[in-house]
Image (cartoon, rainbow, N blue to C red):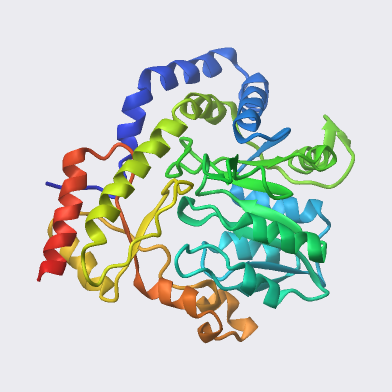
Amino acid sequence: MSVPFIDLQRQYLEVKTEVDNAIKEVLAGGWYIGGAVVAEFEQKFAEYIGVKQCISCGNCTDGLELLLRAYGIGPGDEVIVPAFTWITDAEVVSLVGAKVVFADILSDEYTIDPVSIESQITEKTKAIIVVHLYGRPCRMEAIMALADRYNLKVIEDCAQAAGAKYNHKRVGAIGHAAAFSFYPTKNLGAYGDGGAVTTNDEALATKLRLMANHGQKERDNHIIEGKNSRLDPIQAAALLIKLKYLDQWNNRRKVIAAQYTSQFSEMDGIICPQPSDDHIYHIYGIRVENREALKAHLSHYKIQTAIHYPKALPELAAYSHLKLSIDQYPVSGNLASQELSLPVFPELTNDEVAEVIRGVGLFFDK
């Protein structure tokens, strides 16, 4: 049996009729940029997250950059980001001219460590970008307390965590603002690029809408300089359909993850993600010392896996100018060398889940 790491076609076939009809309506309507469908998605997504405002944009990277610019963060400022995440969170800091400062992560949760955050705060620190990595919420209570104490903005990167909750509140509604990705592989994925920013700050939302649309309030009335970053109606129409199923799909991910954890916890040499009701498992990442051997073994049994991420950010050539040592971020370095991601997309069949468990078991039995 072959087990894919992800199969986007399966989900499409599940909602094909609804999605096809929604896209046909957009095409027949003849309005292909902005318009009522995008506005409807923004409203529905804001209601789902539990915030006053949702501002759609081209992608999550744009959303994060727009937020930093809207907060006036630039040269001379510092922004703290986790040392273990996708490069987006660091590169947007550099794009606005600020300095990226890394904090280590928690060994059991893979999210940014509040203690490490505080150790990196200086008089130049203006914001913290927290990443709900793999779909697990960060320790937001402690982080927001730090933000209050030092007068910092907290920006949530929810790219991998649409639908996750922290203390009964959805991520994206806890920090001062948040950015989401609708990249096709995400828990809520479009059929192309897309993103959104959520916030309860009305003034910030107004500014973001201007900035994402060339700074214009209406056509040719440019209040400020901005950029072009938008979600198109075709993607918005598809996302409106998929949003109805998001909780169902996330719950299926939790079921698969629980089966993995139940079986793998009995095996020596494997560390599973720490169980949490709040975790929606965009990624199910295990830790093993002999990762490459396990990956090759599973590939032999036609089980696809992935590595997220093979290097911590301070190890990348892009940040060599900071002259940092991975020894300063031991948890991030350790995870980067040991993490292996297993299939956990919601359309996996029970037989495929069982095959993954069997394949891993055969390796550790040896």
Q: How many marks?
A: 0
Q: Residue at x 59, y 77 (%)?
A: 319
Instruction: Please give the name of the residue rendered at 76% of the width and 67% of the height, measured from the top-left corner.
Output: 97
Residue found at x 48% / y 64%? 110
Q: Is residue 299 visible?
A: no
- As displayed, is residue 328 above or below residue 268? below
Q: Does the rendering let one see residue 58?
A: yes
Please determine whether, in this image, residue 213 is positioned above or below residue 360. Answer: above
| x and y percentages locating residue 79 in the rendered image | 72, 67
**Residue 103 drawn above or below residue 46:** below
Q: Nearer the viewer, residue 159 or 213?
A: 159
| 192 left or right of 148 in image | left
235 sits left or right of 62 in the view: left
Q: Position of residue 35 (x, y in %)?
A: 68, 22
Q: Quadrant of residue 346?
A: top left
Give residue 29's position: percent from left, percent from top. Answer: 58, 13
From the top left corner, tell me how far across and down residue 236 is, in percent: 56, 28
Tell me: 272 left or right of 95: left
Q: Quadrant of residue 294?
A: bottom left
Q: Is residue 195 toward the left or the right of residue 23 in the image?
A: right
Q: Nearer the viewer, residue 3 or 251?
A: 251
What residue do we see at 61% from left, 35% from top? 49
Q: Quadrant of residue 230?
A: top right
